[in-house]
């Protein structure tokens, strides 16, 4: 499914980027910005961010091994909550 029309990013692209980052550094903090950079793209209008974040958060490799639950990201607040 297309997540970002401006940059042609799919849900598969996001999950693959998360898996790649986790494999290269198991302790890395994965952010939307890092995913865009891993894909060689940059955010444009931001309209996709809610769907981008929910897709990112459902990726199995998002969690850092041994860490607790990842924070819930809310794009409207611009910060993480617990």
Image: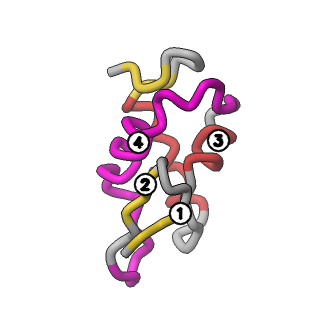
Please give the residue where the numbered disc 3 appears in the rendered image: 38
| Disc 4 from disc 3: Cα separation | 11 Å
Kindly identify the residue that appears in the image at 41 percent across and 70 percent down: 81
**For the residues carrying marks 3 and 1, which lies nearer the camera in this image?**
1
Q: Earlier in the sequence, mark 2 or mark 3?
A: 3
Q: Residue drawn at (50%, 56%), measured in percent from left and top?
A: 77
Q: Which residues are magenta?
A: 40-68
Q: Secondary structure at mark 3?
A: helix
Reply yes or no: does residue 81 show up in magenta: no
Q: CA distance from mark 2 to mark 1?
A: 6 Å
Question: What is the crowding at mark 3: few (fewer than 14 residues within 10 Å), some, or many (at least 20)?
Answer: some
Earlier sequence position, callout 2 versus callout 1: 2
- Front in this rendered view, residue 53 or 62: 53
Q: Residue at x 55, y 56 (%)?
A: 78
Give the alpha-carbon distance from disc 3 to disc 1, as whole Å.
Answer: 22 Å
Are dots 2 and 1 in contact, CB under 8 Å? yes
Q: Nearer the viewer, mark 2 or mark 3?
A: 2
The quadrant of the image that shows the C terminus is bottom left
What whole-number distance in Å separates the C-alpha atoms at marks 2 and 4?
A: 19 Å
Vertically, is 56 above or below 67?
above
Label 1: few (<14), some (14–19) or many (≥20) C-alpha neighbours in 10 Å: few
Q: Which residue is mark 1?
A: 79
Query: Residue 54 occupies which quadrant of the picture?
Result: top left
Q: Name the residue carrying label 4.
A: 15
In depth, the one of 9 and 78 nearer the eye is 78
> Residue under circle 2?
74
């Amino acid at each position: 499914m297309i997540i970002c029309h401006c940059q042609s990013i799919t849900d598969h692209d996001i999950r693959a980027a998360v898996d790649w980052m986790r494999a290269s550094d198991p302790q890395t903090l994965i952010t939307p910005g890092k995913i865009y950079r891993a894909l060689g793209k940059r955010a444009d209008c931001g309209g996709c961010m809610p769907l981008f974040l929910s897709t990112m958060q459902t990726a199995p490799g998002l969690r850092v091994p041994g860490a607790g639950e990842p924070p819930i990201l809310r794009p409207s607040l611009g910060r993480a909550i617990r």
